[in-house]
Amino acid sequence: MVEPAPRRAVYRALVGGYETLREESVAEKSEVDFVCFTDDPDLTSDTWRLVVVEPRFPADLVRSARHLKIVGHPVLDGYDETLWLDNSVALLAAPEAILDDWLAGADVALPLHSYRESVIDEAEAVLNAGRDDYVRVYEQLSVYLRTRTTAMARNPHWTGMLARRRTQLVDAAMQEWWEELLRFSHRDQLSFAVTVPRPGLRLRSVELDNFASALHTWPHVENRRTDRPGPSLRDSLRPPSAELGLVRQQLEDAERAHAWALEERDLAVKDLSAELRDAHVERKEREGLIASLQTETAVLHGRLQAALTQIDLLNTEVRRLQNRLAVRRATRNGADNAKGAGSV
């Protein structure tokens, strides 16, 4: 029995009039549905099916859009496979081909970050660009460094393109990822590596240049707003005493981290010193063994030379005896011949 083809959708979210909706020319030749969630009832599109939604958090439009990205929307419940596409990503290849390739043997697939080496690097970029409240990011890093150390060293993923199957395990992973965005930074690339990978979930990390490939180009930004409420408002309303308490807490955390680093350094120095001592002892033992072997080799060499000299003397004596024997035989033969002649 032939299994029915999976129902598929490409989707994105545009909430709060953040930027101009980009049309996708590949949609015109694709059998995949293109769905855009928006809170703008007047928005129109030639390539996207527009679904009007209410922002989940009217005062936090960023997380409202992230909720649609990560958890989805009831409209997507009827699809077996989906491909999330950031509004700044231009699709060049048919989504059918991307989903066929990326989800072959996988439940979740997305590109690795091609210019960040670790989650910490991504966090530094977020802080340097002022893309989120530094307090949230520092707290998130502090928690992850204590509880998710291995994940922090992983190559982060780039979530501008995200392919998924609709399974219970994937839904659970997405829910945990979303909860992490509620707890910490809304920058989803910081929390993906520490929440989504789990036993049983087949995750594919795609090697793909984030800026340009045969599948896409990025970034394409049109009329992006820069006046959306951000962390600066909350910082400006924070009482000075709270700010002082926060600074003190950060100082205490830094002092503990410094003490921990010193302790780790001292332990590392002790371990290295012990290894060096062991290596020195081993080197001395090897040098003694080499010297002993050299001495024994010299003794054996001397014995060999003496044996060779003795063999030469024996060979000389053998040749002398052979010569004497030959002379005696010759003398005896001569005497026998003379005796035989006299008797005739």
Image (tube, rainbow, N blue to C red):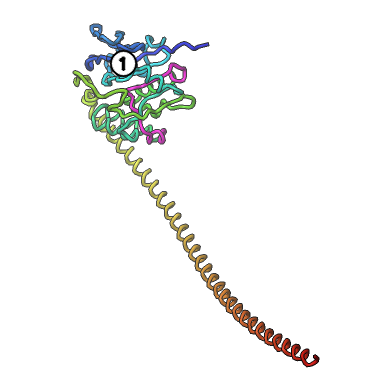
- Determine which residue is flagged by label 1: 12
Quadrant for the C terminus in the image:
bottom right
The quarter holding residue 170 reads top left
Is 253 in front, or is 331?
331
Residue in the image at 23% along x and 6% along y: 42
The picture places residue 198, in percent across and down from the top left corner, at 46, 27
Residue in the image at 38% along x and 11% along y: 76
Examine the rendered structure and indicate whether residue 292 appears above or below residue 226. Answer: below
Give neighbour class at mark 1: few <14, some 14-19, many 20+ (Cα, 10 Å): many
Quick check: 255 left or right of 165?
left
Examine the rendered structure and indicate whether residue 313 appears above or below residue 225. Answer: below
Does the magenta portion include 166? Answer: yes
In this picture, which residue range is highlighted in magenta? 147-170
The picture places residue 12, in percent across and down from the top left corner, at 31, 16
Quick check: 122 left or right of 78?
left
Does the magenta portion include 86? Answer: no
Is 325 in front, or is 247?
325
Quick check: 276 left or right of 313?
left
